């Protein structure tokens, strides 16, 4: 019998066609658990009957490929009437890409306010206009690369990039001195272009330059006692630099991946927000947040200040401060713990208030709420465990690690066609939320690395690898590079090629003894080109003497 006619014959004659399976790739549509066990999955949603009927935990399904923006439709974009664009239709098109697509993508879960400011300011600044045009071209080239399509946008981006740099070295069209806000914003946009090109060493250089200029401008303004008019509000730049500073400290050319021991920028340059510094738990606000934006802003400040607390405690020489006493450390970490509890109480009140609205939560709202809960959960884990310096102490967070990954599923839209735990259907806003793989702020990747490193449970690590399988770039966090790092982490701690078998057995974190656990990660990006060195610190044997293992990657 022709194998291809089997299903049709079965339907026509009421008989079931019998086929012998020949070798070939395993199905990629079954649940993760059945694929690990190498058994046929009935693919019931949300959990397959094959697992639940035998008392096993169904770990769900991998996602279908990301929806992507239809890059071919970009050709229909109208050319701006701006005279700088009218002389070259491709310039107008690239600026339109920035306006209609890139600005939204860069915002992630952040507001669009900064990028609206950039669009407005570009009408008055040649440097910002060419920087925005270069970024639009770079973004279009990035999207084409996802389809392995050859594209001329890389060359166009470079041309506009160079024009923007030239504009920054001379007076603008109105023969006025360039203001610091224009230079800082241009640095952020140049950094973003290099991130899209995955030239992370160059991106870091641009970001450091922007932060340095901001620090100088901030100090000069403070001493003068008066602020000069700017195209981009200073508070907008401070907010985004604060976000990006966290990326710098987490993953940089000369700093480790997780909660860093060394800050590249001191809070004297980017001052921490005094109202968000937890020093008096009794005075913390208990009212419900008025908006998602308010909840995000307060949590961002707490997390940023927590980062600096660990810097001060673990590397006081960087801040030229006396070593923190044990009493100070205990008092301050307790204040943070109280602040995080208060934040969660107010956040839960906000969610309850939003749930009472007549209309259900939109997909962006659900994603944002999940993201904030995830940030809070990871920060709480770090606060309560990081200073113990004992890798075994992370095992108590098993339930929390699994919850982080559940929230990641919500953020990436894994609950397709159904109702996720945040309420509402995942089918709404599908067109407006088409995934294009790049955003400037944190998403799931940093949380995935934290979870995979600190949770030694085999199933959890497989879930992380699955979450990182699709191309995602979140600022300096690259899903493909982090996936590579996670695989090496497990090979060192568990042994090469043993993860799937361990997941099938249900091996928990306790299987990995203390002396096999990686205690520190460092990453060093190449200053030029696409390359990095991952340095892992791990005990040599049961004596707990630490040795280093280096892994080199180029892409």
Image (spheres, rainbow, N blue to C red):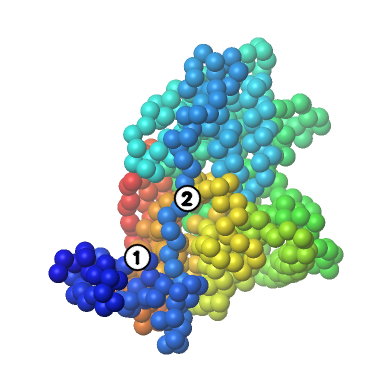
Query: Quick check: can you spot residue 313?
Result: no
Toward which corner of the image does residue 173 lie, by quadrant?
A: top right
Q: Position of residue 80 (x, y in %)?
A: 58, 21
Mark sitting on residue 67: 2
Mark sitting on residue 508: none
Which residue sits at x=59%, y=14%?
83
Is there CB contact under 8 Å for labels 1 and 2?
no
Task: Give the Cα distance between marks 1 and 2.
Answer: 18 Å
The residue most toward the front is: 13
The residue most toward the bottom is: 54
Rate crowding at label 1 as few (under 14), some (14 to 19) or many (20 or more) other CA atoms within 10 Å.
few
Q: Using the image as rendered, state which of residue 8 and residue 390 is in the foreground.
A: 8
Q: Position of residue 502 (x, y in %)?
A: 35, 78
Q: Is residue 490 left or right of residue 69?
A: left
Q: Which residue is identified by label 1?
A: 28
Which residue sits at x=64%, y=31%?
118
């Amino acid at each position: 019998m022709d194998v291809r006619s089997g299903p049709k014959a079965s339907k026509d004659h009421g008989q079931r066609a019998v086929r012998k399976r020949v070798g070939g790739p395993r199905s990629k549509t079954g649940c993760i658990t059945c694929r690990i066990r190498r058994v046929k999955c009935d693919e019931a949603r949300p959990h397959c009957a094959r697992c639940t009927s035998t008392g096993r935990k169904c770990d769900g399904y991998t996602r279908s490929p990301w929806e992507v923006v239809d890059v071919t439709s970009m050709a229909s974009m109208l050319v701006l009437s701006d005279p700088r664009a009218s002389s070259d239709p491709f310039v107008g098109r690239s600026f339109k890409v920035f306006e209609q697509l890139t600005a939204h993508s860069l915002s992630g879960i952040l507001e669009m306010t900064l990028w609206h400011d950039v669009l407005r300011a570009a009408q008055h600044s040649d440097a910002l206009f060419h920087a925005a045009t270069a970024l639009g071209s770079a973004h279009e080239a990035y999207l084409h690369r996802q389809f392995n399509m050859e594209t001329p946008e890389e060359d166009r981006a470079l041309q506009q990039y160079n024009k923007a740099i030239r504009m920054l070295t001379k007076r603008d069209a109105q023969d006025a001195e360039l203001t610091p806000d224009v230079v800082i914003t241009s640095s952020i946009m140049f950094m973003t272009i290099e991130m899209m090109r995955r030239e992370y060493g160059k991106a870091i250089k641009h970001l450091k330059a922007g932060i340095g200029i901001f620090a100088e401008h901030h100090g000069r303004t403070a001493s003068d006692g008066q602020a000069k008019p700017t195209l981009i509000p200073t508070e907008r730049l401070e907010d985004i630099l604060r976000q990006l500073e966290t990326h710098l400290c987490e993953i940089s050319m000369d700093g480790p991946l997780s909660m860093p021991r060394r800050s590249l920028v001191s809070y004297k340059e980017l001052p921490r927000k005094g109202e968000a510094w937890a020093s008096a738990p009794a005075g913390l606000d208990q009212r419900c947040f008025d908006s998602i934006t308010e909840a995000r802003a307060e949590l961002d400040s707490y997390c940023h200040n927590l980062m600096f607390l660990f810097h001060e405690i673990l590397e006081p020489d960087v801040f030229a401060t006396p070593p923190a006493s044990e009493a100070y450390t205990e008092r301050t970490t307790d204040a943070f713990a109280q602040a995080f509890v208060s934040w969660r109480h107010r956040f839960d009140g906000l969610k309850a208030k939003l749930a009472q609205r007549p209309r259900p939560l939109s997909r962006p709202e659900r994603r944002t709420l999940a993201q904030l809960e995830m940030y809070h959960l990871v920060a709480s884990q770090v606060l309560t465990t990081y200073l113990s310096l004992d890798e075994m102490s992370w095992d108590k967070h098993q339930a929390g690690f699994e919850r982080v990954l559940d929230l990641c599923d919500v953020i990436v839209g894994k609950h397709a066609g159904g109702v996720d735990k945040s309420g509402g259907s995942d089918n709404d806003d599908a067109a407006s939320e088409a995934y294009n793989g790049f955003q400037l702020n944190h998403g799931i990747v940093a949380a995935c690395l934290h979870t995979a490193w600190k949770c030694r449970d085999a199933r959890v690590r497989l879930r992380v690898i699955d979450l990182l399988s699709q191309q995602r770039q979140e600022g300096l966090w690259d899903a493909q590079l982090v996936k590579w790092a996670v695989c090496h982490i497990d090979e060192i701690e568990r042994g090469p090629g043993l993860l799937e078998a361990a997941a099938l057995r249900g091996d928990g974190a306790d299987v990995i003894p203390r002396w096999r656990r990686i205690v520190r990660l460092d990453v060093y990006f190449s200053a030029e080109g696409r390359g990095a060195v991952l340095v892992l610190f791990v005990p040599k044997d049961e004596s707990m003497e630490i040795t280093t293992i280096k892994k080199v990657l180029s892409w």
